[in-house]
Amino acid sequence: MQGLNLRLIILIIVISAIVSFLSIFIYDRFFALKVTVVDLRGFIEQTRVLYSAGKLSEQDVDRLFNNLKKQIDSLPDNCMVISSEVVLKKPKRANDLNLGIK
């Protein structure tokens, strides 16, 4: 009888741990707000400099802006995009968009 109670307690603990882990994982993956930082000012300035220097054509500029729009549009609904000008401190794990400028 004692062994049965011990097994039952262990089973309850294992099931509880699995359910807790899955709950946290699902919340983080699908519901928690994610913040993505975009250096929009730097992107525009760098694009302007390269375009003025003749290193980018008008089609290249259009492609870069369309790429930025596609990246922003492809983010999940629980992802918020903010400009880097309003970020006071960048966290170590911030998601940055690849703007495609070298």
Image (cartoon, helix red, strand yellow):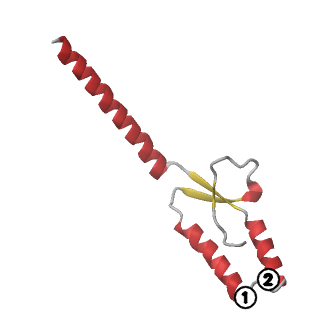
Which amino acid, by three-letter code, is at mark 1?
Glu
Q: Quadrant of residue 63?
A: bottom right
Q: Residue furthest left?
A: 1
N-term mark: 1 or 2: 2
Which amino acid, by three-letter code, is at mark 2?
Tyr
Q: Which quadrant would the C terminus be assigned to in this image?
A: bottom right
Is 41 drawn above or below residue 11 in the view shown?
A: below
Query: Which residue is label 1 attached to?
Result: 58
Please report the residue visible at 75 percent of the width from the left and 55 percent of the height from the top. Answer: 86
Query: Which residue is label 2 attached to?
Result: 51
Label 2 secondary element: helix
Question: Cβ–Cβ below 8 Å for labels 1 and 2?
Answer: yes
Crowding near the residue tagged with mark 1, few <14, some 14–19, many ≥20 C-alpha atoms within 10 Å: few
Residue 56 locus on image (x, y percent): 75, 84
Label 1 secondary element: helix
Is 97 drawn above or below residue 69 in the view shown?
A: above
Q: Residue furthest front?
A: 102
Please report the residue visible at 52 percent of the width from the left and 68 percent of the height from the top. Answer: 74
Q: Nearer the viewer, residue 18 or 40?
A: 18
Please report the residue visible at 74 percent of the width from the left and 88 percent of the height from the top. Answer: 57
Crowding near the residue tagged with mark 2, few <14, some 14–19, many ≥20 C-alpha atoms within 10 Å: some
Q: Is residue 16 left or right of residue 81?
A: left
Q: Is residue 18 left or right of residue 77?
A: left
Q: Residue furthest top?
A: 2
Q: Quadrant of residue 101?
A: bottom right
Residue 6 locus on image (x, y percent): 24, 17
Is 5 drawn above or below residue 50 in the view shown?
A: above
Residue 40 locus on image (x, y percent): 73, 66
Q: Quadrant of residue 2?
A: top left
